[in-house]
């Protein structure tokens, strides 16, 4: 007999990888109910000809889980996603999903189809029974105009949707252009999803990092220290590649779980990435563990330039940075073209080490 989500959660608490939180525990029964239904109805068709004679089994309401940063929303959704034993499931960051949708619409338009959203939605539907979105946020008018039609098709097809967000549905696309056209989507979310606030008073990421060292100089044990921080922030997750579609390309963070990314300097700064790529990474992460920042000079000028852009994106996005580097920020780039401009980056690296940096955002 399989363990329930509450039992899996408690086992992780007992193992020390999670801290017991009543607010988190209170969400698990609703997720368990969805898990049970999905495993009893893993596909929309019961047999080869079932779709010809009967409507597919329609699921119960999905879940819209919202609350402050670091409360454990993504962790709960990942626990549910990993434990739900069905073949047709997808878990994706909402920003990356919408980037992918825009790319697919662009391709569909080239075929001359009257309504490119329809084939794009059907392409998602055919391989999906469960769709999990992390960090739903809508700030772009194009997204706002598309998302309602997409979700209408998803719900009609019987897809179960579970999503996390930092804000309630009513605050999505707040003060956006032509927001009145977006209001039916908010009503749809309220109607088709159970909207639940995660009322935990604890910001676990900030608690774990408050007063903790986040900038490490070379030493024999640095990799183990960073691995320990990763395990603490993610609950010991193995991590997966986070692939973000940006302007028709895939930008990757090699290891990602629960809003935390892990990469080396060379993974991100030795590739031909630009401001848009780094902004997409910053939008997708709450914490970045960046390893092996080297001494910077004219010999690696292009990599250094990308590093400056990366730090700017993380700084503006209030992404918590934990890193290992060849030297202190002020001594990373001492000579060569760009060393003067690096002084601002060094200042930001220093500021981002403070215990309360990024709080309240």
Image (cartoon, helix red, strand yellow):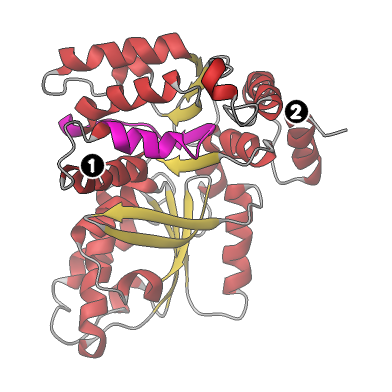
Q: Is residue 203 visible?
A: no
Residue 340 position by quadrant: bottom left
Q: Check disc 1 and report its element: helix, strand or loop.
A: helix
Q: Which mark is residue 105?
A: 1
Where residue 46 appears, as percent x and y from the top left, is 65, 26
Where residue 261 appears, as percent x and y from the top left, is 46, 56
Q: Is residue 95 magenta?
A: no
Which residue is found at the position 21% from the left and 79% from the top? 302
Residue 57 position by quadrant: top right
Quadrant location of the N terminus in the rendered image:
top right
Distance from the alpha carbon under mark 1 to that under mark 2: 40 Å
Report the front residue among 258 and 104.
104
Where residue 251 appears, as percent x and y from the top left, is 33, 61
Q: Check the image and name the residue furthest to the right.
A: 1
* Position of 331 relative to 185 (above/below): below
Where residue 344 appears, as percent x and y from the top left, is 19, 64
| Left or right of 359 in this view: 84 | right
Q: Which residues are magenta?
A: 118-142
Q: Nearer the viewer, mark 1 or mark 2?
A: 1
| Left or right of 175 in this view: 210 | right
Q: Is residue 143 visible?
A: yes
Crowdedness of circle 2 by 10 Å Cα count: few (<14), some, many (20+)? some
Q: Which mark is residue 32?
A: none
**Residue position for label 2:** 6
Which residue is found at the position 30% from the left and 16% from the top? 185
Which residue is found at the position 22% from the left and 44% from the top? 108
Q: Is label 1 in contact with label 2 (beta carbons under 8 Å)?
A: no
């Amino acid at each position: 007999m399989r363990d329930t989500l509450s039992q899996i959660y408690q086992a992780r608490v007992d193992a020390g990888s999670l801290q017991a939180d009543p607010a988190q525990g209170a969400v698990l029964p609703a997720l368990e109910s969805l898990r049970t239904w999905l495993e009893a109805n893993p596909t929309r068709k019961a047999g080869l000809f079932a779709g010809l004679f009967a409507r597919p089994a329609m699921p119960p309401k999905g879940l819209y889980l919202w609350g402050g940063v670091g409360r454990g929303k993504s962790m709960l959704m990942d626990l549910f996603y990993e434990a739900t034993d069905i073949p047709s499931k997808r878990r994706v960051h909402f920003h990356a999903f919408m980037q992918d949708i825009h790319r697919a619409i662009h391709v569909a338009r080239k075929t001359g189809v009257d309504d490119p959203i329809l084939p794009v939605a059907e392409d998602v539907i055919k391989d999906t029974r469960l769709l999990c979105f992390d960090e739903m946020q809508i700030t772009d008018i194009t997204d706002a105009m598309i998302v309602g039609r997409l979700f209408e098709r998803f719900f009609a097809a019987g897809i179960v949707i579970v999503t996390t967000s930092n804000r309630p549905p009513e605050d999505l696309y707040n003060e956006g252009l032509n927001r009145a056209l977006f209001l039916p989507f908010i009503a749809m979310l309220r109607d088709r999803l159970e909207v639940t606030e995660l009322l935990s008073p604890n910001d676990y990421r900030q608690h774990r990092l408050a007063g903790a060292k986040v900038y490490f100089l070379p030493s024999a044990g640095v990799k183990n220290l960073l691995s320990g921080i990763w395990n603490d922030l993610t609950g010991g997750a193995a991590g997966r590649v986070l692939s973000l579609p940006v302007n028709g390309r895939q930008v990757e963070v090699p290891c990602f779980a629960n809003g935390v990314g892990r990469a080396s300097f060379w993974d991100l700064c030795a590739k031909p990435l630009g401001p848009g790529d780094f902004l997409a990474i910053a939008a997708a992460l709450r914490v970045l563990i960046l390893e092996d920042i080297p001494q910077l000079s004219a010999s690696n000028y292009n990599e250094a330039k990308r590093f400056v852009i990366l730090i700017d994106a993380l700084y503006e996005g209030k992404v918590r940075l934990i890193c290992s580097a060849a030297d202190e920020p002020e001594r990373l780039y001492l000579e060569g073209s760009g060393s003067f401009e690096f002084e601002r980056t060094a200042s930001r690296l220093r500021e981002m080490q403070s215990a309360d940096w990024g709080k309240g955002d």
